[in-house]
Image (spheres, rainbow, N blue to C red):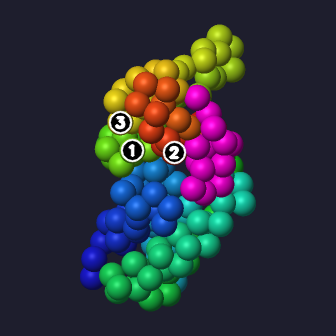
Amino acid sequence: MVNPREAAAAVVDPEIRVITIDELGILRSVETDPATGRVVVTITPTYTGCPAMDVIRADVRRALAAAGHPDAEVRTVYSPAWSTDWISDSGRAKLSAAGIAPPAPVARPNVVPLTLAVRCPRCGSPETEQVSRFGSTACKALWRCRSCSEPFDHLKAL
Ligand SMILES: [Zn+2]
């Protein structure tokens, strides 16, 4: 049997296929219920109503079944709410390499909010503009670089 934590952590995000749900920070816990022996996976959705969550739940169940845990349960928790701050450093590097601008850290309460430039993932220029609030999926916004005129997806900061 494959370690259930490793099996669940290896599931890739169905929309951003370069990053795993563990790197994205939506995999909260993988535990074995001591009474039943069932594996219980807890995930937190990224964006409310993101249709990818149904796919992720199915993918996690499939990965655990392949790892020898066919009766795994996937629970969804909404609190505390997922934030783009939960994306790991390696996840941010992979997003950037895939041409998706990683979100800037979100300003916290009692911290003066800063408007951080969204840098072009291709040429690194901060001269960018939002073209549309919705990119290739509802979870991403479409931006364009004014330096190299290339459009790119920007994962919305939450
Ligand atoms: Zn550019």
Q: Which residues are magenta?
A: 129-142
| Label 1 crowd (10 A; few <14 / some 14-19 / many >=20) | some
> Where is the N terminus found, in terms of image quarters?
bottom left
State which quadrant residue 10 falls in: bottom left
Name the residue that disc number 1 marks: 99
Residue type at numbered disc 2: Asp
Name the residue that disc number 2 marks: 153
In the image shown, does 3 or 56 lie closer to the viewer?
Answer: 56
| Label 2 crowd (10 A; few <14 / some 14-19 / many >=20) | many
Q: Are marks 2 and 1 in contact (CB under 8 Å)?
A: yes
Name the residue that disc number 3 marks: 122
Kindly state the secondary structure of the residue where label 2 is placed. Answer: strand
Q: Is residue 17 left or right of residue 2?
A: right
Disc 3 from disc 1: Cα separation? 7 Å
Q: Is residue 32 above or below residue 16?
A: below
Kindly state the secondary structure of the residue where label 1 is placed. Answer: loop
In the image shown, does 136 or 87 lie closer to the viewer?
Answer: 136
Disc 3 from disc 2: Cα separation? 11 Å
